[in-house]
Every structure is written in structure tokens, then in C-alpha cells.
Amino acid sequence: MGFETDAVHAGEEPNLKEGGTGDVTAPIHLSTTFARKKTDTPTGGYAYSRTDNPTRHALEVRLAALEKARFGIAFSTGLAAETSVMLALLKSGDHVVAFDDLYGGTKRLMDKIFADKFDISVDYVDATDTKNVERAMKENTKLVWLESPTNPLMKLCDIKAISQIAKKKNAIVVVDNTFATPYLQKPLVLGADIALYSTTKYINGHSDSMGGAVILSDEELYTKVKFLQNSAGAILSPFDSFLIMRGLETLALRMDRHDKNAIQVAEFLESHDAIKSVRYPGLKSHPQHELAKRQMSGFTGMMAIELEGNMKTAKKFLEALKIFSLAEDLGSVKSLAEHPASMTHASVSKEFREKVGITDTLLRLSVGIEDINDIISDLENALKVASR
């Protein structure tokens, strides 16, 4: 099936057998437990909702289908998905190679929890240069952790080349594909072992459900992560599963509109005197534009911009926006803006932020699906206010 067909139908085929109800939309199964006739035979394979739930299972089937993968595992948040992967696949003394530009919560998890409490060492490298990843690999390297594009600097890495390097070292490659979504990029097809998502973002798309997902095809890895999902209990609720299923139905349509709006916003901002730089993979000026064209089928609605001025300029700009909401989220149908240094990456040290390029005037924009003229007008007005 094509992507758009799977996004509407996978995991939600009506049960037309005798006794079935023929639901066109998967119902929300709120039951925490499931009765059975025999002690050793769970009804329909379901025993307890932490272990498995029909609504969550339907979502997991759809997520796997969209990635052309065998397995999907849904979690309560993106960070719960990340934590489960690390707990399932790492042990004390192991080493991780990670992109130096990661979501602040991911870096906090690695540094403050796994490094400090579990003796997991992490080396952060600029993975835009594949050789940096290769040089950082050690005998005890178990995971290579990537984002592409990254949050917030919109850096890209060659997923295929890095996956080939990791396989020679028997390391597992995890790609946080939240910005791109499976519609625009498929990490598993490119050679990665695990595609990871905050489903809170584009996957759901409406800022009304939190969740995370791990998608993979290797049965051994699946068994380990699935065991953690059940034993640690960071499961996605039936209602959130239903909302994300609903959101996925329009993912392709939304991403096309996000992409169309974002390139026009990027071109407008790149030509504006008050803008120091625009980082958007769809622009020819992006240092990895050619790589983006090779491994992505679109460029998403995310971008990073740097204003001329200082922290005060950035705050004035953000507070003058009307259509863009100032909020720590992304991937919504609504346009959103945030200040990484004081919001999403506030937990990252100022020294490290400046080292990787997260300055006080760097802003992250998530371009929504509103009328493009209204979006640009809003940005133009905010730039005028900030420049005064």
C-alpha cells in the first residue's frame, strides 16, 4: 500500500466476522483488564492493558506500516521511548556516540541520568562529518544516537553512511526522526536499526496528545524494548493512542502544506536585513542541501533563524508575534516559535550551547498550515517591533 493508504487504514481494518462490530474507526478500549474463559488463554491475546491494549496495538501496527517496519512500540512520551531504548540496550560501562546537536531533554537524560547514575559514557560529535562518528567509536560503543534534522540547528547527517560504519563495529543506530516524520524520511530504509519519535509533534499534529514511539524490524531488539515497555510501564494511554491514530490520517497532507509554507518563509527571512542567518534544509544555502535532497523527500516545516541583535531583540520579536504562539512544542498545525537558549535547551550549559551554535538570538520556528500571507505578515511585523 502507498503511504497515504497505510496512514488511513493500517491497524484499523473493520472486523466484519460474525460477532464483529464493523467499526470503521478503532474504538477506544478503556478497560484495564480483559476477562478470559480459560486460565491459560487470554481473550484475543489481551490480558492487561499495560502489557497490551487493542487501541494501542492498532496504533503500533500503523506506525510500523508507515516506516515499512515489522514492529511499532508506543510510549507515554518521546523521552519515555528514549529511556526505554537506553535501559533495554545499554549496561554499565557501555559507550554512546551522539550527535552534538540534540534535543535538550535527550542530552539531559544522557548526562544527568545515564552518565551520572549508570556509568554510561557519551561522546558528542559533529555528525555532519561522518568521519567524526567513525573516530569516536570505541570497543565498548553500543549505540550511535542521531537526529536528522537536528533540534534546533537543523543539521543533517548521512544516515546510510553512518549506519554502515556502526554495523562494522556492532553498534546499534538510533535515529530520532521527529522533525522529518516517516513521510519525508525513513531511517530504517537508510540502514538505521531504530527510528524514534516524539509522537507529540508532527505524528499527532494537533498539540493535544503526548506520546513517543520506537519503530524497528529486528526481532531481538524488539523483544528487549517491548519487555521494557511492559516491565517499566511507560505506556501510551488508549485515548492518546486514538488521538494519534486520528492525526496520522492527515500526516501526508499536513506535511506537504508545512513544507510548502516553510520554504516561502525561509526565502522571505533569508532576504530580510534583520535576519543574520536561516537554517532550513530546503534552501540552497544550507550546507547539507544536497544530502537533504538525497535522503529526504521534503524539508519539513522546521527551521532555525538567528536575528541581528541580542537577547533583548529576540525576546521583543517573540513577544510581538500574533499568529505564532510562543511555546515549547513543534509540529502542530498551528505556527509555533521558541527560544532554545531559555526554553528547550535551558538545561544545557551555556558553554556547550555556544560551542554548538545555540546563541541568545537563535530562534526555532515551526511553520504551521495557516495562510502563508498571514504567516509572513506576522513575522514581518514582529521583525519591525524587534528592530525598533
Image (spheres, rainbow, N blue to C red):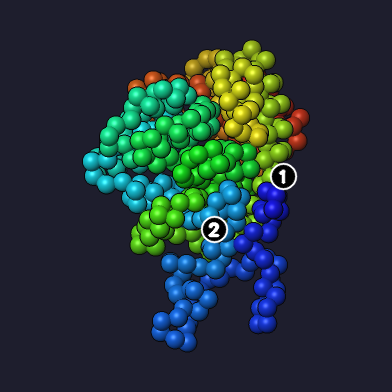
29 vs 119: above or below: below
Q: To which residue does mark 2 refer?
A: 60
**Which of the pair 46/253 is nearer the observer?**
46
* 54 sits left or right of 76 in the view: right
Number of residues whose C-alpha sits closer than 10 Å to that of mark 2, classed few (under 14), some (14–19) or many (20 or more): many
Looking at the image, which residue is at 66% across and 53% down?
Answer: 7
**Amino acid type of disc 2?**
Glu
Q: Residue at x 45, y 51 (%)?
A: 218
Q: Is residue 345 visible?
A: no
- From the viewer's perspective, tell me whether residue 136 is left or right of residue 265: left
Distance between mark 1 and mark 2 Cα atoms:
21 Å
Write down the quadrant of residue 29 in the picture: bottom right
The picture places residue 202, in percent across and down from the top left corner, at 60, 44
Q: Mark 1 points at which residue?
A: 253
Residue most toward the bottom?
A: 37
Of tags 1 and 2, which is closer to the observer? 2
Q: Where is residue 354 in the image (x, y as percent from the top left)?
A: 40, 20
Q: Is mark 2 on a helix, strand or loop?
A: helix
Camera-side residue of 385 and 134: 134
In percent of the image, x 69 and y 27: which residue is there?
A: 263
Q: Residue at x 40, y 58 (%)?
A: 223
Report the side of 33 relative to 292 (left or right): left
Which of the 4 quarters of the picture holds residue 133? Answer: top left
Picture coordinates of residue 240, whole percent (x, y): 55, 59
Q: What element carries label 1?
A: helix
Q: Do the numbered discs 1 and 2 sit on residues whose CB atoms are within 8 Å?
A: no
Q: Give the mark nearest the N terminus, 1 or 2.
A: 2
Residue 339: image x %, image y %? 50, 30
